[in-house]
Amino acid sequence: MAKNVSDNNAEELAKKKLQEEKEALLNEIKHTYSDEPIEEEISSDEPAEEINSDSDEPAETPDASDEIEDFTEPKVIARSPMPKYGKGFIMVPVSIGITIAAIVLGHIRPISNGIPSNSIFRYIYLGLGVLLLIAAILLIVNAVNEADILTNAQMGKLVTTGVYSKSRNPMYAGVLFGCTGALFVSGNAFMYVLPIIFYMIFSGVIANTEEKLLINRFGDEYKEYMENVYRLFPLPK
């Protein structure tokens, strides 16, 4: 009987000990995996800005677009393109055609009587004609290449430098000089009235078409340009 009691006590002690060990193990596991991570405090050398709690308005934040504007290039407002060739350009093929016809007719009797028989006058006309032809080539080439007038016209830009600082219409002046030079080389004095007619027609067409357009486009800038530079002749004004 005493032996059975001792066996029961030993068994209860073993169960109690086992239960204590189990609880201790559960407590250790709970303590290990139930701790929450601690939030790190962010330190700053500069004090944080104080928020005015009395104001209902939200604090202003810098706009990113304002910072971008400081680094953008200034906007360039380009004028609308201008026509490459003005209305006066129609006079170019007309004057060239009339000049060719005058040279041919100048060697047909009785018009050929306008060619001087004196060789001295013939050489003078020939020399003047060659000089005018050279001047015509220089004016036209500089107007097209050096001043790049066609590109600037597409950009809506007024060109007042280079050859355009000497003549407002150097291409028309070149055509006028070329036709005059060809007539002098031909040598028929009866045809020397044609350059005067060409000049009057060129001036009238340019003044009533292209110059009005340019004044409307550029205003005082072109008016000042007109006061300083001749319409055709590349001479100091």
Image (spheres, rainbow, N blue to C red):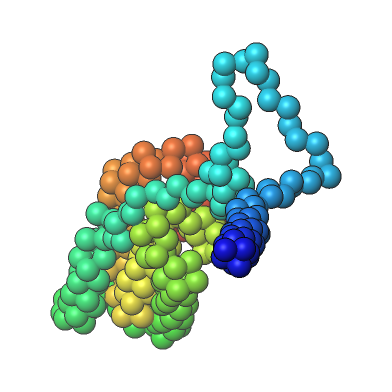
Q: How many marks?
A: 0
Q: As rendered, which of 49 and 230 lies closer to the eye?
A: 49
| Residue visible at 53% across and 43% down in the picture | 65
Query: Which quarter of the figure has residue 170?
Result: bottom left
Pinpoint residue 171: horizontal percent, then vertical percent.
Answer: 38, 65
In the displayed image of the protein, which residue is found farthest to the bottom? 119
| Residue visible at 79% across and 45% down in the picture | 44
Q: Is residue 36 left or right of residue 89?
A: right
| Residue visible at 22% across and 68% down in the picture | 93
Q: Quadrant of the N terminus?
A: bottom right
Query: Which quarter of the figure has residue 12?
Result: bottom right
| Residue visible at 33% across and 44% down in the picture | 213
Pinpoint residue 99: horizontal percent, then vertical percent.
Answer: 24, 72
Pinpoint residue 216: horizontal percent, then vertical percent.
Answer: 36, 39
Give above or below for 78 relative to 94.
Answer: above
Q: Is residue 204 visible?
A: no
